[in-house]
Amino acid sequence: MIRLTRPSALTAVAWLALLLPLAVFAAPASPLEPTLGRKGRLLLEETFAANQVPAGWNKNTGELAIVDGALRATELAREQHLGAFRKALPLQDCVIQLDLKFDGATTFHLGFDPAPRELKKTGHLFSVVVTPTTWSLMEHVNKSDPKSKNVVHAKANAAFPRGQWVTLLLEVKGSAVLVHAAGMEPLRASAADFKVKKPGLVFRVGGKDGQGVLIDNVKVWSLE
């Protein structure tokens, strides 16, 4: 006669230890989606698959290069200014998604300028400011007003480890702004000036010479 025995507690724990990693591996992270509206027309998609920086991705300061199928952006210390880069693309209510990896840099900004004649303001409009340990939504100083200051509307601790890819999703709807990253509580902000037309994307990078960020899989939609 064959006797059936219950597996020991140790055996059950061992099986559980084997199965749990498989379950985690088999459950991909949910894609980030906007919550202020729904994605409309796709306005831009760039995977940086070519060997050269695509036309229209321009530097004001710093350096741009294609490295391992991604856009690498760095600051140049001799310029004494954050690396500043722009992609012209008329926008207003919109969603921007990109993959980001810190490659030695200490800070990354994704944001906008106001379109000409939209505001009586000189300088940037607002940015999501990301470091390896924090992120924030910042309304930038009016450079034509000596009393003006940057305003941080939202800030939180975060984990953007160097050498690891993370996906950001930034949405703008009227005066409201929301930024998402997988596994983190979104940051929210609102200001009257945020609703204006925008001439394109602004990227800024801070770090020592040779230290930068990698950017990939950039997509931009209208937000309806």
Image (cartoon, helix red, strand yellow):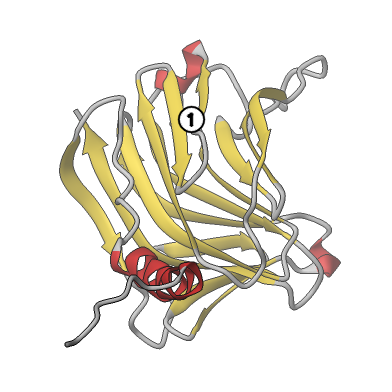
Give the residue at x 37% y 51%. Answer: 97
Neighbour class for label 1 at 10 Å: few (<14), some, many (≥20)?
A: many
Observer-nearest of 6 and 101: 6
Q: Is residue 131 above or below residue 151?
A: below
Query: Can you say which quadrant of the picture contains the N terminus?
Result: bottom left
Give the residue at x 41% y 56%. Answer: 98
Observer-nearest of 35 and 170: 35
Marker count (numbered): 1
Q: Is residue 150 above or below residue 170?
A: above
Query: Can you say which quadrant of the picture contains the C terminus?
Result: top left
Residue 141 appears left or right of 78? left
Say what amino acid the circle numbered 1 marks: Pro
Give the residue at x 57% y 31%. Answer: 126
Residue 133 appears left or right of 10? right
Determine the image quadrant of residue 4.
bottom left
Give residue 148's position: percent from left, percent from top: 76, 17
Q: Is residue 151 above or below residue 56?
A: above
Residue 151 in sight? yes
Residue 109 appears left or right of 76? left
Write down the residue under mark 1: 114
Give the residue at x 40% y 66%. Answer: 20
Mark 1 residue element: loop
Determine the image quadrant of residue 18.
bottom left
Residue 55 in sight? no
Determine the image quadrant of residue 7.
bottom left
Give residue 81's position: percent from left, percent from top: 77, 55
